[in-house]
Amino acid sequence: MAAGAHLRGMTARQVARIVLDREPLFILDVRNEGDYSDWKIEGERVASINIPYFDLLDGVEVALGKIPTEDRVLVACAKEGSSKFVAEQLIKAGRGDVYYLEGGMKSWSEHLEPVKIGDLKQGGALYQFVRLGKGCLSYMIVSGGEAAVVDTVRLTEVYCSFAAQKGARIRHAIDTHLHADHISGGRKLAEQVGATYWLPPKDADEVVFDYAKLEDGAEIAVGDARIKIEAVYSPGHTIGSTSFVVDDQYLLTGDILFLESIGRPDLAGKADDWIENLRNTLYKRYTELPEELLVLPAHFGKITELGEDGSVRARLGDLYAKNPGLNMPDEAEFRRAVKEHPPQYPNSYQEIRQTNMGIIQPAEERQREMEIGPNRCAVHDK
């Protein structure tokens, strides 16, 4: 064993800070090849290799020659146990500065990192919660001792804790649409804190619970400063997809518009019906909005979409200049791009949709399993 070396864990939060701070990290991922190919930890200065756990049971010599000596090494597996074993064997073989991922890739999938987007004109601020391991983005608007959360993920304790730190009571939980790639925590959060849960009614035909109808032009006030959240009906990803203009500064686009891509219309099996809606939203409705609005989507597809501060944002006018999905003047070309090369479906997406409708209530561990893997809500994500 390397002198002074001992087995150490690294939390998902610590990994997130390494990624966001663009520090070097080398990862030995010991999951099976298929899981690694499907989804892994990525970062600007993160490098990784995959050697399945069962190939290392008889010794880690095969890994030693592939691990750089100058960087920290993180061993990752699905739940934790395999990575602890391999990390310990690497240390015994003389390799120092080795860690295992606490909680495994499940913990990575669930970590949320809050980033301040900006101040509101009458006081308060808007925050983005970056779920690095899943590509999900959610938001909290805080003003005058009140808060609204948009596109809440199921990890509701994070929002409750953050709101408490800001001295705010969560009054509204809002979903831009019925999600299919992750389990919404909006209704759960509303029940926990006594808030109102908002959902577009055109996405709610099959839901089995009560909700407040989020319709075009609806305004939701937050705090004494009366920060306005204005609903903008923007169908295409789903028939009910609704965007928000917040404080005349920010445009929360849900899964309709991303920084490098556009939303896919096929997760409810209605691509043919919804492609025209998608085009109308992107090529008509959004063009009527001010170009200076800061676009804040509900997902990102690539780690390169994160800015220097770790946030995902872009000016609406800039997206019209460079986003491929917004630069297809020929309608037939647009239709082909959306339909002919769709990305792989999200894992368990039909089961996730049913959960978000309230039709099924999977146990917590099953919910974690359903969400494992990358988001696949965009047309151009690979």
Image (cartoon, grey):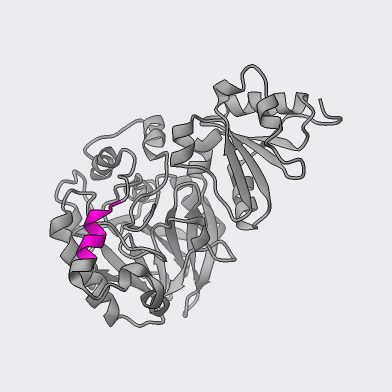
Q: Is residue 57 above or below residue 204?
A: above
Q: Quadrant of residue 265?
A: bottom left
Question: Percent position (x, y) of residue 223?
Answer: 42, 69
The outermost residue toward the top is 58
Residue at x 58%, y 43% (from the top left corner): 12
Can residue 237 be spotted in the picture? Answer: no
Residue at x 68%, y 29% (from the top left corner): 87
Q: Is residue 91 above or below residue 333?
A: above
Can residue 267 be spotted in the picture? Answer: yes
Q: Quadrant of residue 174?
A: bottom left
Residue at x 32%, y 63% (from the top left corner): 262
Q: Is residue 255 above or below residue 246?
A: above
Query: Closer to the camera, 263 or 203?
Result: 263
Q: Where are the magenta residues, as a range? A: 334-342
Question: Percent position (x, y) of residue 373?
Answer: 42, 41
Direction from residue 231 to residue 364 in the image, left or right: right
Question: Percent position (x, y) of residue 40?
Answer: 51, 42
Q: Quadrant of the N terminus?
A: top right
Residue at x 45%, y 58% (from the top left corner): 169
Direction from residue 151 to residue 99 in the image, left or right: right
Question: Percent position (x, y) of residue 37?
Answer: 46, 39
Query: What secondary structure do most residues of the magenta stretch adopt?
Result: helix
Total tally of numbered discs in the picture:
0
Query: Closer to the camera, 220 or 342?
Result: 342
